[in-house]
Amino acid sequence: LAKTTQPISMDSYEGQEVNITCSHNNIATNDYITWYQQFPSQGPRFIIQGYKTKVTNEVASLFIPADRKSSTLSLPRVSLSDTAVYYCLVGDSTGNQFYFGTGTSLTVIP
Amino acid sequence: GAVVSQHPSWVICKSGTSVKIECRSLDFQATTMFWYRQFPKQSLMLMATSNEGSKATYEQGVEKDKFLINHASLTLSTLTVTSAHPEDSSFYICSAGRQSNEQFFGPGTRLTVL
């Protein structure tokens, strides 16, 4: 299993772009990268998933370099409501082998 | 789409009693469901993987007889904490797999054992 490493916490001002990087040096060929957002006392919420290069949806972008040993979640123009813990998960295509990282606590400052 | 519910959202019980938590996928069939527990300011810890119609697979260190999991249908899995003790107090979260590696999480259940 590819273990992941994320910064424990980050602070950002409102309106800034935030980039959270996850390291997964031992990622396997079949592994996907998924990011989740979690608010206190709630279940995680799916943000974005990717395999390689760049993926973009209405809330975030995910950048994955060619060697896939890291990935960066990019949140454009964060607001106070984006204060949450963000988890990087690396897992295979079957969905039964995966590693949930320790999470990055993002605090958005007014 | 892809909504997962949990019931109850919170429960308080006396030490020694058993508590059942339900996890339902409301608008899709989930062949696999996962159960996690989460302590304050910590990451999710996978407890077990539950496949419909078969026995759950427990992670190392998780007591099978303590945490009973039943995945009776493609939309329902239950976790029963038997003879609960204060150290079992935690936030329990389930997730359901819709296809391949997608997981959709329930809102969680806060268990407090007095």
Image (tube, coloured by chain):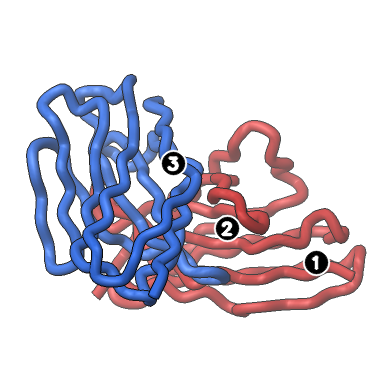
* Residue under the point 44% across and 55% down: B33
- The crowding category of the residue bearing disc 3, from other C-alpha atoms within 10 Å (few below 14, some 14 to 19, many at least 20), is some
Which callout, 1 or 3, points to the residue nearer the camera?
Answer: 3
Element type at marker 2? strand
B50 relative position to A48: left or right = right
Q: Which label number is shown at residue B18? A: 1
* Mark 2, residue position: B70
Any idea which chain is the red one in this picture? B
* Mark 3, residue position: A7
- The crowding category of the residue bearing disc 2, from other C-alpha atoms within 10 Å (few below 14, some 14 to 19, many at least 20), is some
Element type at marker 3? loop
* Residue under the point 77% across and 62% down: B89
Where residue B7 sits, quadrant-wise, is bottom right
Any idea which chain is the blue one in this picture? A
Q: Nearer the viewer, residue B3 or A17?
A: A17
Element type at marker 1? loop
A2 relative position to B90: left or right = left
Q: CA distance from mark 2 to mark 1?
A: 15 Å
Which callout, 2 or 3, points to the residue nearer the camera?
Answer: 3
